[in-house]
Amino acid sequence: MAGQGFNTFATQVVRGAAETGFEFGAFIGRGKLARLIIAEAKDVAGVVAGRTLTAFGMGRGGTAYLRRNLNVLLARINRLNVDKATKTALLKQAREGTYEIRLFGSQAKGTTYTPGVRAQLRGATGSSRTNVELIKWP
């Protein structure tokens, strides 16, 4: 059973020789207060262009990639060993686009994202309610 902290779960699938999909899924809290987080990490030097966030339907693949990845996310949420209220809250957020997107970048490599990436992600996901947060790791 997941606890009250930051709980992660796999969202990538193998397609051909590559793992594709969102970097990972996570949630904070339990029951109706659970919050869904979708994470994407880029470990590159310099600026990351929005078009490279293909898991979210930006760049090549378009919205078909986003739909496929959201379907995987929904399936993985359905398999979580959590109480019914938590699962219901997470599924609702995934379907309605009210999840949080966290973009991770390497502090050591100076990873940054292009200006406007938050707005681009909101547009790509079709929800102005999507919260986007940029996080640096060491």
Image (spheres, helix red, strand yellow):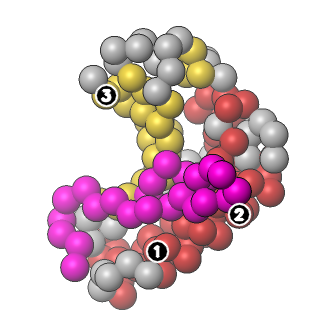
Q: Which residue is mark 1?
A: 77
Residue 88 sits in which quadrant? bottom left
Rendering coords of residue 122 (x, y %): 64, 42
Which of the image's four quarters has the C terminus? top left
Q: In terms of secondary structure, where does tag 3 sit?
A: strand
Quarter of the picture containing the N terminus is bottom left
Which residue was labeled with disc 3? 137
Q: Secondary structure at mark 1?
A: helix
Residue 22 drawn at (x, y percent) = 55, 52
Q: Give the distance between the C-alpha atoms of the residues marked 2 and 3, in whole angstroms.
A: 28 Å
Residue 16 part of the magenta segment: yes
- The residues tagged by marks 1 and 2 sit, at their Cα atoms, a distance apart of 14 Å
- Residue type (three-letter) at the residue carrying disc 2: Arg
In space, the residues marked 3 and 1 are separated at their CA atoms by: 26 Å
Give percent across and percent down for residue 127: 65, 51
Q: Provide the residue span drawn in magenta.
A: 1-25
Question: Nearest the camera: 33 or 52?
Answer: 52
Determine which residue is flagged by label 2.
68
Dot 1 and dot 2 residues touching (CB under 8 Å): no
Q: Please, what secondary structure does the residue beneath circle 2 have?
A: helix
Which of the 4 image quadrants contains residue 135?
top left
Mark 3 in CB contact with mark 1 (< 8 angstroms): no
**Sequence order check, earlier mark of 3 and 1:** 1
Graded by Cα atoms within 10 Å as few (under 14), some (14 to 19) or many (20 or more), the crowding at tag 2 reads some
Q: Residues within 10 Å of mark 3 (few under 14, many from 20)?
A: few
- Determine the residue positioned at 41% across, 14% down: 109
Front one among 44 and 1: 44
Q: Is residue 120 above or below residue 32?
A: above
| x, y percent for residue 30 | 27, 72
Q: How many marks?
A: 3
Question: Along the polypeptide, which appears first: circle 2 or circle 3?
Answer: 2
